[in-house]
Image (cartoon, rainbow, N blue to C red):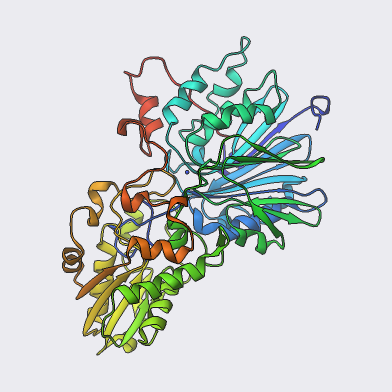
Amino acid sequence: MPPDARRLQTVPQPMSKRTGGDGRLTTAIDPQDQGPQDACGVFGVWAPGEDVAKLTYFGLYALQHRGQESAGIAVSNGRQILVYKDMGLVSQVFDESTLESLKGHLAIGHSRYSTTGASTWQNAQPTFRPTVDGSIALGHNGNLINTHELAQMVADLPGPDGELELHTRPVEESTNDTSLVTALLAHHPDTSLEQRALEVLPQVRGAFCFVWMNEGTLYAARDPQGIRPLVLGRLDRGWVVASEDAALATIGASVVREVEPGEMVVIDENGLRSHRFAEADRKGCVFEYVYLARPDATISARSVHESRVEMGRQLAREFPVEADLVIPVPESGTPAAAGYAEESGIPFGQGFVKNAYVGRTFIQPSQTLRQLGIRLKLNALEHMIRGKRIVVVDDSIVRGNTQRAQVRMLREAGALEVHVRISSPPVKWPCFYGIDFATRAELIANGLTPEEIAASVGADTLGYISLDGMIDATKQSRETLCTACFTGEYPVELPDESLLGKHLLEATLQSPTMGRALPVLNNP
C-alpha cells in the first residue's frame, strides 16, 4: 500500500446504529547526550459548524514542543471517523488538501514522542478501534506503569464468539500502552462508552491525559495525580481540551478551567458533563515548570515563564559568582538566565545563536540522526564571549555531554571563565510518567558530586538550584508536586523493574516464555 494511502483510515457506520507516552535537550549539540523529552501533546474539539480539522491542526502546532516524532488527527461527521496520521512534525504530516478532506463537527489530535512503544507509524496516534455500534479514536499524553496488566486484561476480554476479534485482529501491529486502553474502552457490548470508561479508568495506573471520541461525543480524562496538564476551553460554538492553555489561545478559545485529577469530562450535543472516577491526589510534574511546558503556559494558576524567571533569581541567590555576562542556552534557559542576570546585576546577553529551522529534537530518536547534529543547533557568538567571564544558564543536566560541548565552544570562543548554572536540582532518577530520560546508570549526577561534574564538563564552577528553591518558584506546595526525578519519591507505586520500559510490549510479544500469548493490537 502506498505510504500516503495507508495514513487515511475510514470506517463508515450505518446511521441506524448511532444515537448520539531519554528525549533531547533543546541544545542537543552532542550526539551522545539525551535530555528530558515529554511524551505527547493532545487536543480535542467539539464544535458543530467549525472547521474542526484545521482547529486541531493549529492546536497541535501550538503543542509541537511536546512531541515531534509523529502526528495525527481523527475527525467525525456523526456517521464515521476518519483518522489521518504519519511520522514527522505536524506541518510535515498535514497539508491543505488533507485537512480539507477531514470534515466533521468533532476531532481529536495528537503529537507524539515515544515513551512506551517504538517510534513507528503503527504506534502513531490517535489509535483507532471498531466497537459493536461504531468506533473510537484516542490520544494519550503520559505513560502507564501497569502496561503488562492492561495487556492481560485485553487478552482476557470476555464476550460472545467473534467479539474479541474486533479488538485483537492484527490489522496493524501496535506496541504502545495507548492501544491497550483503546481496546479496553472499545469493549462495551452491554453498556455505553461513557459507562465503560468509568469502569476502565480506575484500573489504569500511571500518568495519563486521555482525549478520545466516538462518532458523536468527545471525552477527556486525567489521572488521579494530575501528573500531566490538561485544560478545558470554550469556543463560541463548542468546547476544546488541550495539554496546555497556549493551544487554546492559538485558536481563540477561552480557558474555562483545568480538567481535574481523577476527572472525566464528556461533551456532546447535550453540553458538558463531568464524572469523578477517582479521588484526586495531586502530584503535578514539577518539570513542566522547569522545561516541558511552553513558557506562555499557565499551570495550576502559575505562569510557567514567571516560574522560570524566579528559578533564575533564586539560582543567583544560592550560587552567586563574579562574572561579566549571563547567557542562556536557548531557548529553554532564557527565562532563568534573565532572572539570574536581574538578581545578580550581571549584564544579560546572547552568547549562543540557535538555528531557528532546527526543531526541538530530531524526528526520530536514533543515534544515527543525533550524530548528524553535533553543531547543527548552536554556535557561540565570539564577539560576545571573547575576554569575558561567562555565566551560562540551562534548565537541566542529564548525561553531561551537552554541557561539555557547550563549555568547549565557549572556551574556543575566548571565554576567560565559564560558570554553569542549572535551574533544576541534579537529575538522579528516571521518569516513568511520560518523560524519556536516560537510565539511572547514565545520569551523571547519580555518580558524581557537583564539583566532580564541573570538572567533567570543563566548567570553572557549577551550581544547581536547590529543591526547595525550585519548588518555591512554582508557587505550589511540595505535597502537590511530583519530584521523582530529583528525589526518587514516586507518587504512583512502581511495579517490578522487569515490567517497566519503553519496549516492554515489543519484548512481551516476541517472548516465547510468556505463557498465553498477548494480543497483537491493530493501530490503523
Residue appearing at x 62%, y 15% in the figure:
163
Q: Please determine whether, in this image, residue 457 is positioned above or below residue 57.
A: below
Residue 381 visible in the shown view: no
Q: Please determine whether, in this image, residue 228 is positioned above or below residue 266.
A: below
Q: Please determine whether, in this image, residue 477 is positioned above or below residue 221.
A: below
Could you say where residue 237 lies in the image, as x and y percent from the top left?
81, 53
Could you say where residue 305 lies in the image, as x and y percent from the top left?
51, 69
Numbered disc total: 0
Q: Quadrant of the C terminus?
A: top right
Query: Is 219 left, or right, of 391 in this rendering?
Result: right
Which of the two residues, 491 or 92, is positioned nearer the viewer here?
491
Query: For residue 419, which quarter of the picture?
Result: bottom left
Residue appearing at x 57%, y 28% in the figure:
200
Could you say where residue 313 lies in the image, as x and y percent from the top left?
40, 75
Q: Please determine whether, in this image, residue 186 is positioned above or below residue 440.
A: above
Which of the two residues, 126 or 336, is positioned nearer the viewer here?
336
Query: Is 372 left, or right, of 101 in this rendering?
Result: left
Q: Quadrant of the N terminus?
A: top right
Which of the two residues, 73 or 197, is positioned nearer the viewer here?
197
Could you say where residue 126 lies in the image, as x and y percent from the top left?
59, 41
Query: Is 237 left, or right, of 489 in this rendering?
Result: right
Residue appearing at x 34%, y 60% in the figure:
467
